[in-house]
Image (tube, rainbow, N blue to C red):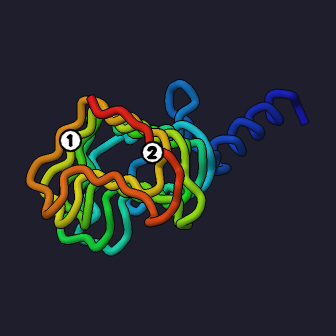
């Protein structure tokens, strides 16, 4: 068989086999509900995402380090029973540039353990609106930066930063 045949066959095979999509700058696209991030890396939202009141977070972070660019889009989950973005043990974590609406809360970041503080959470240029509970909740985060965020109409707490009772870990952060 000719080289042309094999070249064409290889190109067709590459087009048929599902390869992970990579957005610009090596970022993995996020475009559906729910999305579970189970590998470290940079991620970018590529469209508005509506959780339709589902029970899971729109984005559930289970790896670290993770950088999420909301890319100006809106994540919605009216009546949903979970935060819009949940991170239970995935730090360092950066979230930036978008809008979160609805859900039990906007962004929840926690270690999942009362004796291990997590380090370096950066949340910037995020609007959190109309949540049932909190806007942003950081639990056992020992180093954080919250910059140019807006929390409006959260159910009971706009921004909560707390740790386990009796632990002597310093909590240091910046809110701008």
Residue beneath disc 1 = 127
- Secondary structure at badge 1 equals strand
Distance from disc 2 to disc 1, alpha carbons, whole Å, reads 24 Å
Q: Residue at x 43, y 47 (%)?
A: 30
Judge whether residue 52 can be spotted in this image.
yes
Q: Which mark is residue 171?
A: 2
Which quarter shows the C terminus? top left
Residue 14 appears at what percent x and percent y? 70, 41
Count the numbered circles shown.
Answer: 2
Toward the viewer: 10 or 37? 37
Q: Residue at x 48, y 39 (%)?
A: 143
Which quarter shows the N terminus? top right
Q: Residue at x 31, y 43 (%)?
A: 47
Residue 107 sits above or below residue 143 on the image: below
Residue 152 appears at what percent x and percent y? 11, 48
Residue 172 sits above or below residue 140 on the image: above
Residue 139 sits above or below residue 46 on the image: below
Residue 100 sits above or below residue 104 on the image: above
């Amino acid at each position: 068989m000719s080289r042309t045949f094999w070249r064409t066959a290889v190109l067709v095979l590459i087009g048929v086999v599902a390869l992970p999509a990579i957005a610009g700058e090596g970022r993995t696209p996020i475009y559906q509900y729910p999305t579970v991030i189970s590998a470290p890396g940079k991620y970018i939202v590529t469209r508005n995402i509506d959780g339709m009141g589902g029970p899971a977070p729109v984005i559930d972070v289970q790896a670290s380090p993770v950088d999420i660019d909301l890319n100006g889009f809106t994540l919605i989950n009216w009546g949903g029973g979970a935060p819009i973005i949940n991170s239970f043990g995935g730090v360092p974590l950066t979230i930036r540039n978008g809008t979160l609406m609805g859900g039990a809360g906007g962004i929840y970041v926690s270690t999942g353990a009362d004796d291990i503080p997590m380090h370096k959470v950066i949340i910037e240029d995020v609007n959190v609106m109309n949540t049932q509970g909190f806007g942003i909740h950081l639990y056992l985060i020992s180093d954080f930066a919250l910059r140019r965020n807006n929390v409006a109409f959260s159910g009971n707490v706009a921004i909560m930063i707390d740790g386990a009772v009796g632990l002597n870990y310093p909590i240091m952060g910046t809110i701008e």
